[in-house]
Image: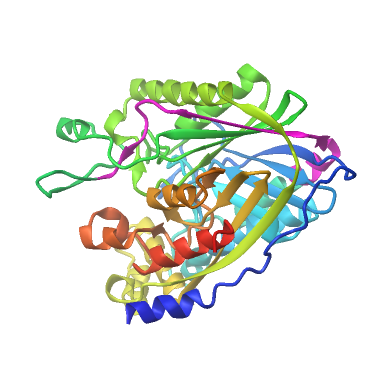
């Protein structure tokens, strides 16, 4: 039965934007790039990951680029939010596309996934609005306003398009930041290690586990002058959280520090970090956050220092659709979650979580897409969900001779996208996945397709 489902759905995967024409030849116009940023901090008192926002430690930013190859425009955007689900993610992409004058299929929006930032599901809020005393988990009016501001920033950036003719790649190992959340010791025992190990020295002593220790940096430059740097690293980015505080946390501190030092626009994307966090090195203290920031910053600097530039020869964009079956049994059943959604005795966050499951169960399948920006042999892969690190390492193995950078945390409608083995092992991630175990095979097939390996 399982194989039948996989084969049937694999047959439905077709490339609807197989390959754009090469963007540059000897006679073509030099491609251009513009950078944009917009403040996406929620107002005080608004719901922040289940609690009202009490303090703004740092602003939350949406940062990105518009790339114009003379024929089309492409947009990459990283948002200092925890998550954007379903129509909320689509809203960001649609407004950005309209502002940039391009098709929504050529817009990639990803959350950095800080937990001191909003987790937004407008579809779930619309269901809750129909309930008596339904809680507010998402301010739909604010969502409309903040996307208007972002689209205005994107549109304004088009006045400052700059030609670039070089692309640079660099990478460096990050020391003592990322660690696996899922450790199986030699005795076969499963250990769950999340984002901090305060009071749990036995978890700190466990090995880092299965991670990708490398931070990758892509630089767009004019000659040898860098115009923008894009950084990719896989770890849950939170140090301490759920305390009513807005903050762009470790990656934001490192990103903005490097931007100030270099005077070069910096963007940070979180890779496939579904089962990766900073727990081995984090005890929820400010000292630990400062040390983690310093080490991530050092990795970014080393990656920049290793950068080698090459002339831009071609630019391509590919998109592949992905359909993942939604889990609908047991705790994912519509009736079960409808009852929880209506239960006024539950905390608002739990009612919102149930509403999100109702949204997905009613869909039946999660319709997503994978995007790929390719410049020369540099491939930037855009994935949905909280994908496990396996998918990032898999993508790199598919194209071992190319420079493959991966951004996850696009549309978070599916929640975690796990390996099939993880469902047998247990742990937190499979319980929070809204899609079936066969999703591993389906996502890997789509990755191969969009990377041009099939």
Name the residue at 42% across, 22% down. 295
Q: Where does the image place residue 212, in percent across and percent down from the top left? A: 40, 39
Residue 122 in sight here:
no
**194 shown above or below 282:** below
Magenta-drawn segment: 153-182
Q: Looking at the image, which residue sits at the far left?
A: 187
Q: Quadrant of residue 226?
A: top right
For the image, the number of numbered tags is 0
Query: Which of 18 and 175 lies nearest the eye of the viewer?
Result: 18
- Residue 44 percent across, percent down from the top left: 52, 40
Compared across the picture, whether 337 is left or right of 76 comes to left
- Viewer-nearest residue: 77 or 152: 77
Relative to 15, say whether 3 is above or below: below
Q: Is residue 333 left or right of residue 426?
A: right
**Looking at the image, which residue is at 58% across and 24% down?**
304
Asked if 244 appears above or below 133 in the picture, the reply is: above
Q: State which quarter of the image contains the N terminus.
A: bottom left
**The C terminus appears in which quarter of the rendering?**
bottom right
Q: Is residue 346 left or right of residue 100?
A: left
Q: Is residue 176 magenta?
A: yes
Q: Position of residue 47 (x, y in %)?
A: 47, 49
**Coloring scheme used:** rainbow
Is 324 included in the stretch rendered in magenta? Answer: no
Give the residue at x 62% y 56%: 141
Q: Nearer the viewer, residue 173 or 85?
A: 173
């Amino acid at each position: 039965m399982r194989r039948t489902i996989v084969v049937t759905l694999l047959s439905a995967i077709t490339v609807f934007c197989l390959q754009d024409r090469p963007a540059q030849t000897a006679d073509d116009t030099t491609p251009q790039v513009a950078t944009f940023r917009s403040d996406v901090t929620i107002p005080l008192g608004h719901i922040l990951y289940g609690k009202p926002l009490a303090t703004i430690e740092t602003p939350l930013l949406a940062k990105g680029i518009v790339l114009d190859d003379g024929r089309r425009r492409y947009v990459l955007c990283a948002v200092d939010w925890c998550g954007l689900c379903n129509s909320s993610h689509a809203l960001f992409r649609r407004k950005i596309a309209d502002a940039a004058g391009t098709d929504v299929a050529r817009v990639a929006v990803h959350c950095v996934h800080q937990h001191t930032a909003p987790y937004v599901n407008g579809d779930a809020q619309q269901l809750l609005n129909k309930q008596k005393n339904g809680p507010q988990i998402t301010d739909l009016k604010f969502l409309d306003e903040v996307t208007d501001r972002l689209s205005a920033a994107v549109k304004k950036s088009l006045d400052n398009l700059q030609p670039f003719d070089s692309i640079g790649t660099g990478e460096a190992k990050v020391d003592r930041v990322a660690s696996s959340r899922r450790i199986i010791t030699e005795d076969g025992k499963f250990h769950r290690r999340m984002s901090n190990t305060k009071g749990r020295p036995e978890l700190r002593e466990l090995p880092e586990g299965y991670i990708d220790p490398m931070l990758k940096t892509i630089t767009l430059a004019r000659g040898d002058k860098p115009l923008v740097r894009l950084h990719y690293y896989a770890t849950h980015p939170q140090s301490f959280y759920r305390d009513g505080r807005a903050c762009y946390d470790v990656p934001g501190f490192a990103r903005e520090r490097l931007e100030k030092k270099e005077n070069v626009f910096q963007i940070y994307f979180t890779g496939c970090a579904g089962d990766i966090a900073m727990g081995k090195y984090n005890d929820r203290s400010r000292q630990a956050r400062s040390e983690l920031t310093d080490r991530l910053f050092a990795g970014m600097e080393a990656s920049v220092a290793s950068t080698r530039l090459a002339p831009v020869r071609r630019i391509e964009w590919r998109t592949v659709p992905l359909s993942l079956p939604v889990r609908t049994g047991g705790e994912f059943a519509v009736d079960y979650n409808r009852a929880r959604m209506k239960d006024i005795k539950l905390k608002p966050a739990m009612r919102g979580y149930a509403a999100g499951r109702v949204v997905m169960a009613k869909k039946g399948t999660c319709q997503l897409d994978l995007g790929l920006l390719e410049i020369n042999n540099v491939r930037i892969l855009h994935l949905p969900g909280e994908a496990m690190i396996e998918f990032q390492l898999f993508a790199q193995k598919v194209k071992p001779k190319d420079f493959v950078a991966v951004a996850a945390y696009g549309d978070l409608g599916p929640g975690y996208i796990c390996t099939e083995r993880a469902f047998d092992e247990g742990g937190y991630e499979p319980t929070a996945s809204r899609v079936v175990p066969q999703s591993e095979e389906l996502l890997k097939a789509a990755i191969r397709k969009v990377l041009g390996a099939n």
